[in-house]
Amino acid sequence: MTFNSEALLDRLRSFEQTATPATRYLVAFSGGMDSTVLLHALVATRLQHGTEIVAVHIDHGLQDESGDWERHCRDLAATLGAGYASERVQVDSDAGGGTEAAARNARYAAFRHMVRRGDWLLSAHHQEDQAETLLLNLLRGSGPAGMAGIAPVQAFAAGHLMRPLLGEALAALRHYAKRHELHWLEDPSNRDTAFDRNYLRREVMPLLAARWPAAAARFRQSAALATESGQLLDDLADIDLRELGGAARLSVSGLAALSLVRQRNVLRRAVRKCGLPSVPATRLYQAVRELIPARDDATPLVRWPGGEMRRYRDRLYLLPPCDAVAVDDLPMLNREGQRLELGPGQGELRLIERPAGGIDATAVAAGLRVRYRKGGEEIRPSGHRHTRKLKKLLQDEGVVPWMRQRIPLLYADDRIVAVADLWVADEYAAKQGWGVCWEGGPALF
């Protein structure tokens, strides 16, 4: 029952079989023992992996000592030589599901803002966490995905969420922490058995371990077997997704031709492939019952924390909440090659030289400001004879309704230069110019 930094490094390397190597490691750092061990072990292997490490701390503001905890985390990250970022969140305990669920939703929403393309967010979940999650999911009536427990690897925002300690026993992590004389925080709320997970951890798991000492390991084994079954369901869903057009935009008529069971299976898979939070079973049934059989001219919506399903014509779209759009305070975009992050689910913009035609170099040299529609905008696209209302142009081109207010507009002073990567204004067009490259954004059509 040992854990060391070499075991962590081996686990991270094994993840590269299913995900591209990380551009940064972001450690979800609460300051507790588990995440302290993860951060310490990761820093100890820095020379081997050579990847930037950033400890990210979320302050839920639920305890009077939360400010002291944040300072502890910042100081420890500095002592270890890791980068550091923190964010204070508002926990809406009245949103339904209780304080535990609300805190988790707020935490992961903050993480989504922090994760950039290629990042790996590392969480310190371990073997006992897996056992507790499996029991909780069974008590909630979860299906195969819930019985698989916590996934070691999953798409998340623009990167991946990884749990490299999932196979490690809590005792092994505690032994590592004591051997290296680490100091960590103890959250007093972890002793409150009014929370379901704490009740399982403090009351139920000790009873199970007294009768079956290897209970946590057996639960982990059952979760692994359920994961295998889930993989078969994922394989079937991937076959269906190829026929339906992809995860972010699915053919409604194609979905309607599948059995209800396969419809739900493919939607669950599509949600994960889009890096969205898991969709509750109630919302999944609602999507199958309301979105797929809706009229072609209807625009129904199914929403859950962190995700949405929308329908437009014969397409069903999966995307982050549409109110999560960047505000008009973004830096200038120029030809220096920088990538401009637009916010969660919105992707990024950059300018590329385009010999076949694009934006005039003079306008680009002065820098372009990114804004969003406010109403009344007009443009004469290059090659068009007449000036058009942007609203009408977007409608005629079939841009989905919810994206018409979220398309980045490039401005020189108060004049539109380009509408994302769709059109360049005729007055700023050049035979040899600069093109707009919009990567990772939501589907427009």
Image (tube, rainbow, N blue to C red):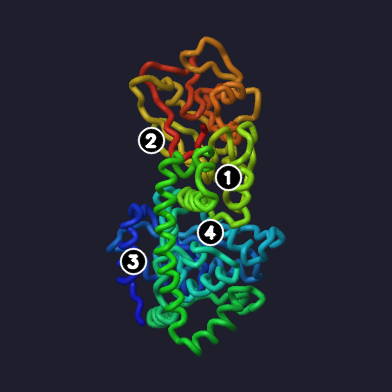
| Label disc, if present, on residue 297 of the rendered structure | none
* Circle nearer the viewer, 4 or 1: 1
- Give the residue type that dot 2 points to: Gly
Residue displayed at 54% across by 29% down: 409
* SS class, disc 3: helix
Marks 3/4: CA–CA distance: 26 Å
Marks 3/4 in contact by CB < 8 Å: the verdict is: no
Marks 1/2: CA–CA distance: 34 Å
Which class describes the residues within 10 Å of circle 1: few (<14), some (14-19), or many (20+)? many
Q: How many marks?
A: 4
Marks 3/2: CA–CA distance: 35 Å
Residue 315: x and y in percent read 53, 37
Residue 283: x and y in percent read 61, 52
Which quarter of the image is occupied by the N terminus?
Answer: bottom left
Question: Can I make out residue 275 in this image?
Answer: no
Residue that carries the numbered disc 3 in the rendered image: 11
Marks 4/1: CA–CA distance: 30 Å
Residue that carries the numbered disc 4 in the rendered image: 86
Residue that carries the numbered disc 2 in the rendered image: 337
